[in-house]
């Protein structure tokens, strides 16, 4: 007996929203760069968001870096 969830690849079962992805990336960057300047945090955030295929404005990235 199988369910729909078991018939899908694991990656398709756990699709995170872009907001969830952004939250996770921001949390990870903050942990990785604790004590760094907001400018450095913004630069790394921009890079990691681009790698994840998430487009945010520079002002949004700056705001996240300064939180």
Image (cartoon, rainbow, N blue to C red):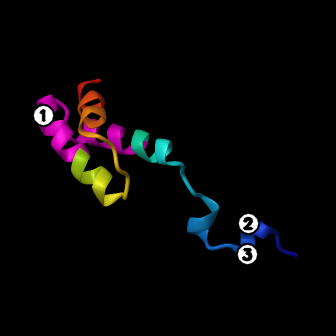
| Total marks placed | 3
Residue drawn at x 35%, y 45% is: 25
Work out whether residue 38 or residue 62 is closer to the camera in this orientation and state it: 62
Residue drawn at x 42%, y 39% is: 23
Residue range highlighted in magenta: 24-45
Q: Position of residue 56 (x, y in %)?
A: 33, 44
Indicate whether residue 61 is drawn in magenta.
no
Q: CA distance from mark 3 to mark 1?
A: 45 Å
Q: CA distance from mark 1 to mark 2?
A: 42 Å
First in residue order: circle 3 vs circle 1: 3
Work out whether residue 55 or residue 36 is closer to the camera in this orientation and state it: 55
Q: Position of residue 3 (x, y in %)?
A: 82, 69
Q: Secondary structure at mark 1?
A: helix
Is disc 2 in contact with disc 3, using a CB cutoff of under 8 Å? yes
Work out whether residue 27 or residue 40 is closer to the camera in this orientation and state it: 40
**Residue position for label 2:** 5
Q: Determine whether 12 is above or below 67 in the image.
A: below
**Residue position for label 3:** 7
Indicate whether residue 32 is drawn in magenta.
yes
Q: Residue furthest top?
A: 67
Q: Position of residue 50 (x, y in %)?
A: 29, 55
Quadrant placement of the N terminus: bottom right
Quarter of image, res 30: top left
């Amino acid at each position: 007996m199988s369910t729909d969830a078991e018939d899908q690849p694991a990656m398709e079962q756990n699709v995170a929203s872009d907001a969830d992805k952004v939250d996770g990336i921001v949390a990870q960057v903050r942990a990785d760069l604790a004590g760094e300047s907001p400018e450095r945090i913004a630069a790394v955030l921009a890079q990691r968001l681009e790698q994840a295929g998430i487009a945010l404005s520079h002002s949004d990235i700056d705001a996240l870096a300064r939180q």
